[in-house]
Image (cartoon, rainbow, N blue to C red):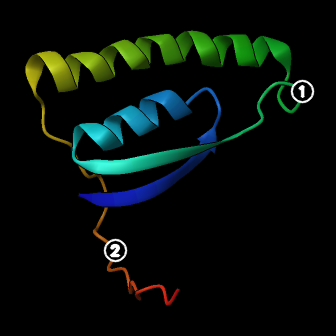
């Protein structure tokens, strides 16, 4: 299993980590603070939209079994082992 650290806004984080794990990526998450940095009215809209996105993610992964869709070109990573 591959591993990843997902860095995103806090309200995206549970869905992002869940989607990584649903395709076999052992993910840890780091959420960036949202409230206080974005106007409250906009945050309420963002979180309402996120509820719908969460439902769609569950539907796509657990009910339908839809494969991930990549919208851009794949980037080659030059991963080097960590000397510890």
Tell me where residue 40 appears, x and y as whole percent.
83, 15
Residue at horizontal 23%, vertical 58%?
A: 1
Tell me how far mark 1 sits from mark 2, CA to CA: 34 Å
Kind of element beneath mark 1 = loop
Residue 40 horizontal side relative to residue 20, left or right: right
In the image, residue 64 sits, relative to residue 4, either above or below, namely above
Tell me where residue 55 appears, x and y as whole percent.
35, 12
Residue 51 horizontal side relative to residue 74, left or right: right
Q: Which residue is mark 1?
A: 36
In the image, residue 45 sits, relative to residue 66, either above or below, namely above
Q: Disc 1 or 2, which lies upstream in sequence? A: 1
Q: Residues within 10 Å of mark 2 (few under 14, many from 20)?
A: few
Residue at horizontal 17%, vertical 20%?
A: 62
Tell me where residue 80 appears, x and y as whole percent.
41, 88
Q: Point out which mark residue 75 bears.
A: 2
Tell me where residue 41 appears, x and y as whole percent.
79, 11
């Amino acid at each position: 299993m591959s591993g990843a650290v997902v860095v995103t806004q806090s309200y995206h984080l549970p869905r992002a980590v869940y989607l990584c794990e649903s395709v076999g990526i052992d993910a840890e998450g780091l959420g960036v603070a949202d409230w206080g940095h974005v106007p409250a009215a906009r945050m309420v809209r963002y979180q309402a939209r996120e509820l719908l996105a969460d439902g769609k993610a569950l539907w796509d992964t657990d009910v339908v079994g839809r494969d991930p869709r990549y919208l851009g070109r794949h980037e080659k990573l030059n991963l080097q082992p960590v000397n510890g």
